[in-house]
Amino acid sequence: MFDLTRSYFNDMREREIAPGASITEEAQCLVYSNADTTGQVSVQPSAGASNELVAGFAITDALAILT
């Protein structure tokens, strides 16, 4: 388990989520998925395969709830 409360991130990179993938919680290990036909690179949660390229961890900022 990766403890986000004891971490410091100095390199923030935003990527699109791969079609059909969903991020269900913070600190999930994300890997790069294949580039689509437009050349856009996206990320998805790791499946634990040995050939995956690690992209980083899922984090979010505090969200304001709108009513």
Image (spheres, rainbow, N blue to C red):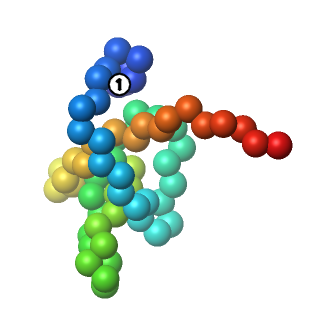
Q: Nearer the viewer, residue 10 or 34?
A: 10
Quadrant of the snapshot with the N terminus: top left
Taking the view exactly as shown, the residue that stands out farthest to the top is 6
Q: Nearer the viewer, residue 47 or 35?
A: 35
Q: Which residue is mark 1?
A: 2
In this orientation, which residue lies closer to the viewer: 8 or 25?
Answer: 8
Coordinates of residue 61 in the picture (x, y in percent): 50, 35
Q: What's the residue at 25%, 49% (across, down)?
A: 55
Specify the quadrant of the image occupied by residue 7: top left
**Location of residue 11 with respect to 42 vertically, above or below:** above
> Relative to residue 64, is residue 47 depicted above or below?
below
Q: Residue at x 41, y 17 (%)?
A: 5
Report the number of discs: 1
| Amino acid under disc 1 | Phe
Rendered location of residue 27, percent (x, y): 40, 33
- For the point 30% across and 73% down, the residue is 40
Q: Residue furthest bottom?
A: 37
Q: From the image, which quarter does the C terminus lie in?
A: top right
